[in-house]
Image: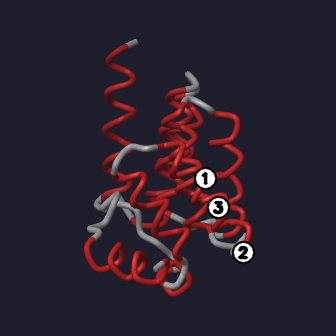
Amino acid sequence: MRKLLFVLLMACMPLVMANMTETNSAANATDPDFAVGKAAIKRKDWKSAIEALNKSVKHTPDNPDTHTYLGYSYRHLGDLENSFAHYREALKLDPKHRGAHEYIGQAYLKAGQPEKAVEHLSALEKICGKGCEEYQDLANAITKYNKSK
């Protein structure tokens, strides 16, 4: 039954966050907990996402995508401490992880530290240029943040 659920989720589920480039797609494709976590994110069910992704990270602790999605989920729950911990782990595992750079930048804005967000924007520019979606999304968030202050 679990395998059937996994196959259905993978076949029917569009990209949760179109701008997050997953770097560990082979491991992600074979991990049902990862798929359940992504599906929960799509539903904005942050607690279920965290539960599933924490299961995933236990058997694939070196997957930067799992840590990025955990950081994303914790951020949406307002738990910035855990959010930052997972984004940092993702970047430790893959210093060029575009999604982790974008989302940690978003977390820094939420924490009132726009200068740190700009550091990650600069990192994204070096990684993928100003034309990549992650760069543009973070740049827009920084502009919006600055206009609100």
SS for dot 1: helix
Decide if residue 71 is on the left or right side of residue 8: right
Amino acid beneath label 2:
His
The x and y percentages for residue 134 are 37, 55
Mark 1, residue position? 51
The x and y percentages for residue 26 are 51, 87
In percent of the image, x 40 and y 75: which residue is there?
5
Mark 2, residue position? 59
Residue placed most toward the observer, 36 or 85:
36
In percent of the image, x 64 and y 61: which residue is there?
90
Q: Residues within 10 Å of mark 3 (few under 14, many from 20)?
A: many
51 relative to 45, above or below: below
Instruction: Give whichever of discs 3 and 2 has the lower sequence position.
Output: 2
Tell whether label 1 touches label 3 (CB within 8 Å): no
Mark 3, residue position? 90
In percent of the image, x 25 and y 73: which residue is there?
12
Residue 95 falls in which quadrant of the image?
bottom right
- Find residue 63 and name its label: none
Decide if residue 49 is on the left or right side of residue 91: left
